[in-house]
Image (cartoon, grey):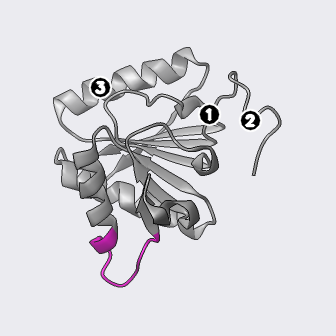
Amino acid sequence: MSRPGYNDCSVIPRRVDFYLLNRADESSRFGFACVVASKAWQQGMRVYLQVDSTETEGELDDLLWRFQAASFVPHARVGTPEATGSPVLVGCEPAPQGWREMLISLTPAVPEGAAHCERVADFIGDGEDDRLAGRERYKTWRAMGITPGTHDIRI
């Protein structure tokens, strides 16, 4: 669903949430991102999971197939024939026009184009480097006039 001015460059997200995980490993971070993607998709949102490399894109694509034994999250990688009809996309470029309801950011910096998404979820592992990068992303959002919500997550 679009808001007035949605395509305007001055649009900012309605909601940005930081998930502070109690584990430092990337698999926990990606696993929890898959849980959030699944819930958002079940609520009828189109979801875009943005990563920083095609290698990571492939890893996340694989994880979405197997992270829950009893269910399936319909998804595709950007640029594949299945992408057009998929409610959940994985990619390393800015979120495509039709997948800006929910951006799940798994990148070290605020992704280009993130300000044009309705909602943004950001996942911070428990390692020092993750925390420092997360603080910088938080400052970026604050500079844009948004106060992100924060959630402590125990995995």
Which percent across, then down, holds residue 143?
54, 14
Residue 139 falls inside the magenta stretch = no
Q: CA distance from mark 2 to mark 1?
A: 7 Å
Which percent across, then down, holds residue 129?
19, 28
Give the amino acid at mark 2. Answer: Tyr
Q: Nearer the viewer, residue 72 or 148?
A: 72
Q: Nearer the viewer, mark 2 or mark 3?
A: 2
Left/right of residue 29 with respect to residue 84 in the rendered view: left
Which percent across, then down, holds residue 35?
40, 63
Q: Earlier in the sequence, mark 3 or mark 1?
A: 1
In the image, farthest residue toward the top: 143
- Magenta stretch, residue numbers: 65-74
Label 3–label 1 contact, CB within 8 A? no
Label 1's element? helix
| Label 3 neighbour load within 10 Å: few <14, some 14-19, many 20+ | some
| Label 1 neighbour load within 10 Å: few <14, some 14-19, many 20+ | many
Left/right of residue 98 with respect to residue 122 in the rendered view: right
Residue topped by disc 2: 6
The residue lying at 36 percent from left, 20 percent from top is 136
Give the amino acid at mark 3. Answer: Ala
The residue lying at 70 percent from left, 21 percent from top is 10
* Res 40 seen here: no
Q: Earlier in the sequence, mark 2 or mark 3?
A: 2
Q: Work out which quarter of the rendered image holds the C terminus and state it.
A: bottom left
Q: Is residue 128 above or below residue 18?
A: above
Q: Main secondary structure of the magenta part?
A: loop
